[in-house]
Amino acid sequence: ESDYRLIASGASDQAFMIRLKNGKLIIINGGWRKEMWDKYDHSTLAHNLFKEMQALSGTEKVTVATWFITDADPNSNRFLLEFNKGEYAGRLKIENFIYNFPDINEIRCLDNRNDVSDFIDLIPSLLGNHIIAEKGKKLHFELFEAKVLYAPDNEGFETLRDATSVFMLEINGKKLIFTGNMTDRISRIILNSGGELNCDAVQVANHGLDNGGVLEFYSRCNAEIRLWNCSEYAYRFFNPKQGYGKSAVSTAVYNQGNYRNNYFCDKITPEILLL
């Protein structure tokens, strides 16, 4: 049985976690949609996610080898707001943070500008090594490698999602692509770069909503496993009248191959995938 494990978080509807064979974790985002953050006690949400980290690592004290932050939307990484309060001192160590935040003055449409600005100011203050993601950059860590498929360029962006970083991780011979809140625009840029996209698992961007990557991108990935940063119930029963609608692209990806190979966040008991 493999010593490497991957889960779509059950305690967060935004997080993916990987356990390395040395017990350290890789975390890709860690937050909650605004409705959950507004409804529930923040410290309780964070505590439940930390308990999940402990269960996956098998240790009381958790070490995160690398925390990947795909975008500057606070919803994607609200756990880090609680982490900064010191409640996890001595119990949680994050060795590396990887991100690339845009100049928010370059974002043309941004409703929560103050919240985003505060989040961007907060992250560099967190204890750990900080790495700026640069498009095409390859990063070598103990037991895994990462490649930045896209990071924000210097152009203006229509929305904050247009400044999402996309990462490919190679772990134990397996390739996994995490798209965060990637847009159609970003997926086309990645396709036009001509790089290899074939992988074992890909995250379907933006919860399966519109403007979450073109179908050619997912076809080129040719991934057996599809990861979703939302609950399966939410995805299957999105309400268009409330402004939520499954995209034709995500529907095609969901129905591709064996539907059982779709793994969603926010399950009471997360399914563990061996890598």
Image (cartoon, grey):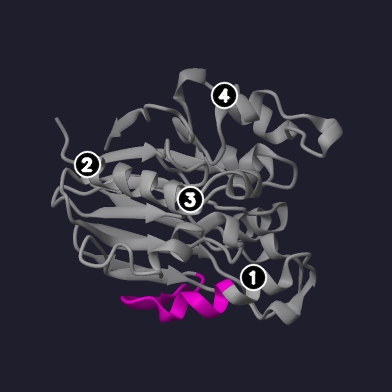
Which residue is located at x 51 percent, y 43 percent?
A: 203
In this view, the residue in front, 209 or 136, is: 209
- x%, y% of residue 206? 64, 46
Per the rendering, the mark at residue 256 is 4
Alpha carbons under labels 2 and 4: distance apart: 26 Å
Q: Tag 1 or tag 2, which sits nearer the N-term?
A: 2
Residue 116: mark: 1
Residue type pointed to by label 3? Phe
Q: Could you tell me the amino acid type at mark 4?
A: Gln
- Earlier in the chain: of badge 2 and badge 3, it is 2
The residue identified by callout 2 is: 4
Residue type beneath disc 2: Tyr
Which residue type does callout 1 highlight?
A: Val
The 10 Å Cα crowd at callout 3, few under 14, some 14 to 19, many 20 or more, is many
In the image: residue 207, left or right of residue 132: right
How far apart, in angstroms, are the residues tagged by discs 2 and 1?
Answer: 34 Å
Sequence-earlier tag: 3 or 1: 1
What percent of the width, then of the height, locates residue 117? Answer: 64, 76
Tell me the crowding category of disc 2: few under 14, some 14 to 19, or many 20 or more residues within 10 angstroms, Cα based.
some
Q: Name which residue lies at 55% across and 63% down.
A: 165
In the depicted view, which residue is nearer to us: 275 or 188?
Answer: 275
Q: Are marks 3 and 1 in contact (CB under 8 Å)?
A: no
Q: Which residues are magenta?
A: 119-135
The residue lying toward the viewer, choosing from 198 and 88, is 88
Asked if labels 1 and 4 touch by Cβ distance under 8 angstroms, the answer is no
